[in-house]
Each structure stands twice: as C-alpha cells, then as structure tokens.
Amino acid sequence: MGALQSAVLLILLLLLSAFFSASETAITSSGRGKILALIDRHPYRKRFFDWLLQDVQRVLTIVLISNNLVNIAASAIGTSLAITLMGHLGILIAVPLMTALIVIFGEVFPKSATIVNSDAVLVMSLPFLRLLDVLLAPFLWLLLAAVKLLGVLFKVELKTRHPFVTREEFEQMVNIGEESGALEEAERRMIHGVISFEETRVYEIMVPRTDMDAVPADCTLSEAIKIFQEHGHSRIPVFNENLDDIVGILYVKDTIPHLVKGDLDSPVSSIMREALFVPETMRVVELFNNMKRRHIHMGVVVDEYGGVAGIATLEDLLEEIVGEIQDEYDKENPSFTPEDDGSFIVQGHVGLEDLSELLNAPFESEDAESLAGLVLSISGDFPCQGDRVAYQAPDGSGAWDIEVLEVEDHRIKLLRLLPREREGLFTSEALE
C-alpha cells in the first residue's frame, strides 16, 4: 500500500473513530424520556429508536467494539506510514503522534461536540449502527455470551434495573430548566408540587383544628346560613358536644331548597351528610383518590388518639400543586411578605419546607413542622408579642433573628424574619 493510500485510510479511520465516540456519548446521554420525545419528532426513525430502547447494552457493545477496532487499525496504519516515510525513527514519532490524534480527534473533540447536540447525532448514527448490528451479529453473540459468563463467574448483575431518570435527577433537571430560562418559577414550583405530592402527608396540608369553623348539630338552618355568609364556606363540619365529636358535614347547597321554602327552623342535623374521616398520617395522594372516588370535597382529619386534628379539603390538596388559591371569599392575607428593609413577614402556620424554598435557606427542626412550631421549640416556652429568638441552620449556612409580631389565644400568628449576616443590619443588638 502506497503512502498516499495509507494517509487516506488513516484519515478515514480517524473519522470513523470520531463517529463512534460521538455515537457513544449520544446514547449514554439520552434517557428514555428523551428517546420517546425523539420518536414523536422523527417518526420515520421509530424502528431504530425502538431497537435502542429494547437493548441499550447491545447497541453500546457495537459502538465500543467498532471504536476499538478502528482505533487499533488507525494506530497500525499510522505506524506503518511513519516507518515508510522515516524508517525506524518513525516508530518513535508514531506512538505520541497517533496517541494525540486518537485522543483529540477520535475521543475528546467529538464527545465534547456531541454533548451540545446529542439529539441530531443520535438520529444520524442509529441507522448505521443498526446495519453494523446485522453485519456483526455472529461476533456480537459470542462476545455478549462471554460477557454474561464473566458476570456469572464474578457474580456481577449486568442488567440495569434502575430507571432511565431517577426522582432526584428529574428534580435537578427542573431546577436547571428554571436557571436556563426553559421553565418559569411558577412552572418549577408546580412540577415540584407534583413530585412531592405522593410523599406529603395529610397533617402537612390540613386546616388545623384551631382554625376550623363548625356548627353544632342542634343549630338551626337560619343560624348556619349566617355562618356560611360570615366565613364564605361552601361546606362546614357539624358536631354534637365538641369538635372531637364530628357527626357530619353541612353543604350550603343543601340549605337552598329550605331557604326557598322559608323553612329555616329545622336543625342542621336533618340535612347534614356523612363525614369522611381520614388519619393524619395518610398520604395526600391516597386522600385525593378517595375523594375523587366518593365525590367528596372535605375530609375530617383525626390523630392517633381519635381526636379531631383538623380538616382537609380538595382545595387544600390542589394548592400543594398549583399554589395558594384565592377565591372571592378569601381574605387577602399573604403568608410571606418581603419588606423593604430586607426582612420578611411570615405567617406562623407556614411550613418549614415551604419557607426553606421561598428563602433558599435551610429551616429544619426535629420537633416542628411550621415556623411557629420552630419558635416554640427554640424558646422552650410560650413567647409573647415582641419576643425574639435566634435560629442557626444545622449546616451553619445561615443565622436568623425571629421576632414574634402577633399572638392570639396562645397561638403565634405572625413573625418577622431578619437575616443576621446581611450587611450586619439585623443582629440581635440591632433589635434592642
């Protein structure tokens, strides 16, 4: 073979090496979701994508075998060409030169370029790889059999059982999507709400007992309608002696026929409906499915001792995904308000997990779920209006002064958060 033919063959082998390296990167960086999306965009290549989804390990084996073969062949041709041109000195030159050519042009550059445009490379490379699969079928069968035998001998599980995209990876993809501008903040929060929906428990989203509105069973419809008008509810629990004895749910729409007839002296117990009782540890996704199946929009939440802990409505469940829903009866009372001085006014019922996300700072406690509970845990006593406590994040990433602004019936309702490290403005001394 002449020097010119060897040079042309060497260039061809380097191009093939670059192709196989790019194909490897395109395959390994494409999860199942991306491949299914590519099928929708390129339906004429569906059979190739189906082949890839069916056996990713086989496709990667084809790529690796082919890449190694062309790299070995390129090294041999390059060495032969160097000896032809420079004699025995060519061996000393061929080794570092071919190493540099294969590493740069056959590995690093094509893989780096593919990361930027992996979809196009995958679409382009799969038909050629499928052709190689047919041509190399006997050799591949022997090789894969040998690999499986080694796996049995060394007790190595070779089949992947994990999903293409894990939950953690998906959450990171959503965060990256927001940072890159592909997702809006509202979209990111909604997606995170869907992801965490299955793990959230009822006690995390319920209206606590202290915030419940209820009517006694012997209350007249006239009195109940006044309560509906005052609070703007469409449903309200009915109790006998106390809130631990919920006996039903009164629907405002069930009072309309009696309102039309002028029959408003009947007790609410005569038209109340059966209540749905759920444990506070139930997952919200189970409650959501239960409500849908039974066509019920409110559940009474009970604790481990059988006492009423609160109520959970369908609106509360949906707010876990879409955020706070304000209807025409809700009073504007934001849970979180940034102030001009850099502090934050926060409702006491705001959960620590939600607060951590809002402020991008860790708020954690083993004994509390809400900000008010965190203050009680830190103080060890019931604080009064104007009292302050200091909070230090467990990982040392942030320090805050928390001031109690409003207390009502032994409940902390409103607090102010002041970051200590911000320009030294909000230290304990500054609050004196």
Image (cartoon, rainbow, N blue to C red):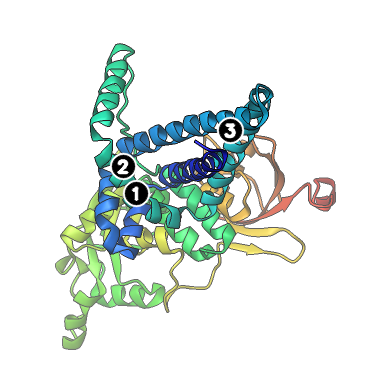
In front of the other: 190 or 48 = 48
Identify the residue under disc 2.
Answer: 132
Q: CA distance from mark 3 to mark 1?
A: 29 Å
Q: Which residue is mark 1?
A: 128
* Labels 1 and 2 touching (C-beta < 8 A): yes
Marks 2 & 3, CB-CB < 8 Å contact: no
Q: Position of residue 234 (x, y in %)?
A: 30, 72
The answer for how far apart the CA atoms under marks 2 and 3 are is 28 Å
Indicate the quadrant where residue 252 lies.
bottom left
Labelled disc at residue 81: 3
Which residue type does callout 2 highlight? Leu
Residue 48 vs 332, above or below: the answer is: above
Whether residue 282 can be seen here: no
Label 2 neighbour load within 10 Å: few <14, some 14-19, many 20+: some
User: For the residues carrying marks 3 and 1, which lies nearer the camera in this image?
Assistant: 3
Residue 420 image point, x, y percent: 77, 47
Q: Earlier in the sequence, mark 2 or mark 3?
A: 3
Residue visible at 63% across and 64% down in the picture: 337
The span from disc 1 to disc 2 (Cα, nearest Å) is 6 Å
**Quarter-of-image position of residue 199:** top left
Element marked by disc 3:
helix
Side (left or right) of 144 relative to 196? left
Task: Give the residue at x 37% y 60%.
Answer: 316
